[in-house]
Amino acid sequence: MNEKPDKHSKKLEQSAEKLSQLEPKNLTLRDENQALNTASNKKCRIRTQIRPMPTLETPNSGGYATLPPMTS
């Protein structure tokens, strides 16, 4: 009868040890994942802000010139 509690307490001890070994790895992976998500979100934000420029109308194209000539 005394054998069962000893067996369970040993199993519980092993599980606690395994958990304490996995916790630091979990924290490391969580931090890496968070960094990757942040980098990915920044790339997405940059991509959505870049829009193609509309074609410029020139006097030769039959449309109106919308911008004055550049002077330096």
Image (cartoon, rainbow, N blue to C red):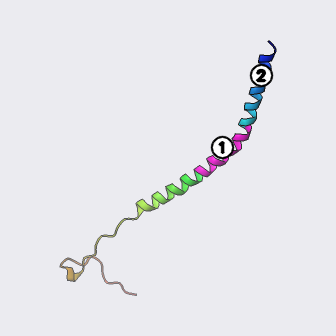
Compared with 59, 29 (above or below) is above
Q: Residue at x 71, y 44 (%)?
A: 24
Position in image of residue 64 (x %, y %): 21, 77
Q: Which residue position holds label 1?
A: 26
Considering every residue shown, the one lying at the far right of the view is 2
Q: Amino acid at mark 2?
A: Lys
Please give left or right for residue 36 compared with residue 10 in the image. Answer: left
Between circles 1 and 2, the one closer to the viewer is 2
At label 1, counting other C-alpha atoms closer than 10 Å, the crowd grade (few under 14, some 14-19, many 20 or more) is: few
Q: Is residue 26 magenta?
A: yes
Helix or strand or loop: what does disc 1 sit on?
helix
Give the distance between the C-alpha atoms of the residues marked 1 and 2, in whole angstroms. Answer: 28 Å
Image quadrant in which you'd find residue 14: top right
* Depth order, front residue of 24/42: 24
Magenta stretch?
Answer: 20-33
Q: Main secondary structure of the magenta part?
A: helix
Please give left or right for residue 18 compared with residue 48 in the image. Answer: right
* Depth order, front residue of 13/49: 13
- How many numbered marks appear? 2
Q: Residue at x 18, y 79 (%)?
A: 62
Q: Residue at x 41, y 62 (%)?
A: 49
Q: Residue at x 63, y 49 (%)?
A: 31
Badge number at residue 1 = none
Q: Which residue position holds label 2?
A: 7
Please give left or right for residue 39 compared with residue 61 in the image. Answer: right
Q: Quadrant of the C terminus?
A: bottom left
